Amino acid sequence: MKRGTSFVEIMIALLIISAGLIGILEISTNYIKTLVFAKEMFVLNSALQEKYQFLIAYRNKMLEKDFTRQGPGFAREKLPTGNFCLEFDRNNSKINTSSPPCRYNFLNGNNSNINYFINVVNSEDLSIVNVFASSSKSFKLEVNLNGFLTRWHPLFQ
């Protein structure tokens, strides 16, 4: 007579297979969480870098505007101090400053889940800049970008 597989053997085989599948599924879900975290961190860091570069351009524009109006030697740094938001108004092509809380908007006009603010402390030789951003889409992320705006501009020479 042929002997078939017993119920116990089938259950042991299913247990081994299910343990392997659970391990593979756990690895894949952790991989997806890591990808989502990396994407959110990349977007958050890109937003911080954009605001920092925008602040540098804003400061330089204010210096050049002051220079053309009053001539050389009269330029003063007109960068706001404290906490503020910096936004480009697409309707009238002007740069607006406002007080926090600030919501980051993507270039295509879509709103994001990123809140940010810029903090500037002016001293005689340089401006200390801190750009803070936070996101709460999937993970609660907070990122800080520190930098200096030195008096490298030709108007300071």
Image (spheres, rainbow, N blue to C red):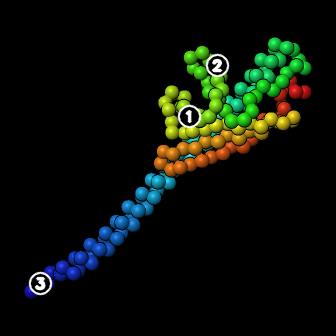
> Relative to residue 10, is residue 96 depicted above or below?
above
Front of the two marks 3 and 1: 1
Local SS, label 1: strand
From this view, report whether residue 91 is shown above or below residue 125: above
Q: Which mark is residue 9?
A: none
Q: Are marks 3 and 1 in contact (CB under 8 Å)?
A: no
User: Which quadrant holds residue 125?
Assistant: top right
Closer mark to the observer between disc 1 and disc 2: 1
Q: Residues within 10 Å of mark 2 (few under 14, many from 20)?
A: few
Q: Residue at x 78, y 25 (%)?
A: 78
Amino acid beneath label 2: Lys
The image shows residue 100 at horizontal and vertical percentages of: 62, 34
Residue 42 visible somewhere in the drawing: no
Do the numbered discs 3 and 2 sit on residues whose CB atoms are within 8 Å? no
Q: Residues within 10 Å of mark 1 (few under 14, many from 20)?
A: some
Name the side, left or right, on which 3 lies relative to 121: left
SS class, disc 3: loop
Across and down, in percent, residue 97 comes to: 66, 26
Apparent side of residue 152 relative to residue 100 in the rendered image (left or right): right
Q: CA distance from mark 3 to mark 1?
A: 73 Å
Q: Mark 1 is on which residue type?
A: Arg
What label sits on residue 2 in the rendered view?
Answer: 3
Name the residue rendered at 81%, 13% in the picture. 69
Residues 25 and 99: in front is 99
Q: Is residue 109 visible?
A: yes
Name the amino acid, label 3. Answer: Lys
How far apart are labels 3 and 2 at the CA level?
Answer: 87 Å
* Residue 42 image position (x, y, % from top left): 57, 44
Name the residue rendered at 59%, 34% in the picture.
Answer: 102
Badge number at residue 103: 1
Work out whether mark 3 precedes mark 1 in sequence or the reverse, and give the earlier one.
3
